[in-house]
């Protein structure tokens, strides 16, 4: 392990923002992680995973610990299920495909979501009708101050919509080192009802899809709408889809009857943030090198040399305009650093 100073994080965040770390070290196993945490326990620390869910608006005046723990394995199986474990530094999409190749189902709808396995529970990532909490069994995490390995069950993670204990009462206290999922080996619960999956499958005359075909459909949809961070800096969906009281939705819907929605419960409705942003006139707009993607209004992009502050200013402009137009507040899904 070598600690480097005044280290550029441009390649370590999917927005491609130029920001410097005061110091930087990469750890590749739990022993190295424990050693670094113990030796630097009196310093400011910043834990970095895949860099796909953050917007850097400033240099990081801390020791940045890049968690690059690799490895994936099946820890047990029975007739119907497999328990698949991925270490924190594994690329999420590659982990999904690895499981699909073994015909293990349950996470195929989350194909091509950027980021690493270790950060998936923090955000309770999800797409196309599936969320991490649906298949999550447990995760192992190292307590930063004691270097003790702790196991969190599904219930203990307190999952919500893009929420978990790691964003709330346990924030900045743990480093997730591995995550375990319970996946189906047969009788897969195929979910094609959300978004454009059915339409994509129909293009190929697929009426009884396999988990691989569902994954392929999701990949095709995402690639058609979402830019590749290696080509155009972005962090995927920048905003959460707002969940609002029915009364708020009905007031907005009366003025905009074409407004799409999804019923969440008796008294709440989810409204697509992308639709709100598009209707507010931001889709495809560019402000210097900060912009809103031409095909998906949920995605803010860096056209080359945008600063994090410029992208943040654009996001605030969008939030204010949407609130004024629809009376609906939208929140950033991305962590603002």
Image (cartoon, helix red, strand yellow):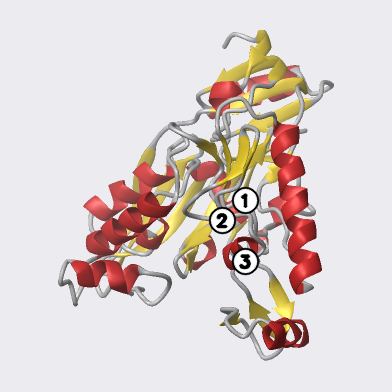
In front: mark 2 or mark 3?
Answer: 3
Which label number is shown at residue 279? 3
| Mark 1, residue position | 238
Circle 3 crowding by C-alpha within 10 Å: few under 14, some 14–19, many from 20: some
Question: Which structural element holds mark 3?
Answer: helix
Q: Earlier in the sequence, mark 1 or mark 3?
A: 1
Question: Which structural element holds mark 2?
Answer: loop
* Image spot of residue 106 (x, y percent): 37, 64
How much space separates mark 2 and mark 3, taking CA atoms?
10 Å
Q: From the viewer's perspective, tell me whether residue 62 is left or right of residue 88.
A: right
Please state the total of marks drawn on the protein image.
3
Which label number is shown at residue 196? none
Is 22 rendered above or below residue 164?
above
Badges 2 and 3: C-beta atoms under 8 Å apart? Answer: no
Q: Earlier in the sequence, mark 2 or mark 3?
A: 3
* Image spot of residue 115 (x, y percent): 50, 41
Question: Which structural element holds mark 1?
Answer: loop
Circle 2 crowding by C-alpha within 10 Å: few under 14, some 14–19, many from 20: many
Q: From the viewer's perspective, tell me whether residue 113 is left or right of residue 284.
A: left
């Amino acid at each position: 392990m070598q600690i480097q100073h005044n280290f550029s994080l441009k390649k370590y965040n999917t927005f491609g923002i130029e920001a410097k770390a005061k110091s930087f070290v990469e750890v590749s196993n739990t022993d190295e992680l424990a050693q670094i945490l113990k030796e630097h326990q009196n310093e400011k620390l910043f834990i970095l995973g895949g860099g796909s869910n953050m917007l850097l608006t400033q240099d990081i005046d801390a020791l940045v610990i890049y968690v690059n723990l690799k490895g994936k394995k099946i820890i047990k199986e029975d007739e119907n299920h497999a328990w698949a474990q991925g270490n924190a530094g594994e690329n999420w999409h590659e982990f999904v495909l690895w499981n699909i190749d073994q015909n293990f189902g349950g996470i195929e709808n989350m194909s091509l979501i950027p980021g690493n396995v270790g950060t998936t529970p923090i955000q309770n990532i999800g797409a196309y009708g599936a969320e991490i909490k649906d298949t999550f069994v447990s995760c192992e995490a190292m307590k930063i101050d004691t270097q003790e390995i702790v196991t969190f069950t599904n219930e203990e993670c307190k999952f919500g919509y893009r929420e978990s204990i790691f964003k709330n009462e346990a924030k900045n206290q743990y480093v997730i080192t591995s995550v375990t999922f319970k996946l189906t080996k047969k009788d897969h619960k195929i979910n094609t009802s959300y978004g454009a999956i059915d339409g994509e499958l129909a293009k190929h005359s697929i009426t009884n899809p396999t988990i691989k075909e569902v994954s392929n459909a999701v990949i095709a949809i995402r690639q058609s709408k979402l830019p590749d961070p290696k080509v155009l800096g972005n962090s995927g969906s920048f905003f959460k889809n707002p969940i609002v009281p029915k009364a708020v939705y009905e007031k907005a819907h009366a003025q905009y009857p074409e407004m799409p929605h999804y019923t969440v419960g008796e008294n709440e409705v989810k409204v697509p943030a992308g639709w709100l942003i598009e209707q507010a006139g931001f889709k495809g707009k560019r402000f210097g090198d900060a912009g809103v993607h031409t095909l998906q209004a949920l995605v803010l992009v860096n056209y080359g040399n945008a600063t994090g502050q410029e992208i943040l200013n654009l996001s605030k402009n969008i939030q204010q305009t949407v609130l004024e137009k629809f009376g609906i507040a939208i929140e950033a899904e991305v962590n603002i650093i």
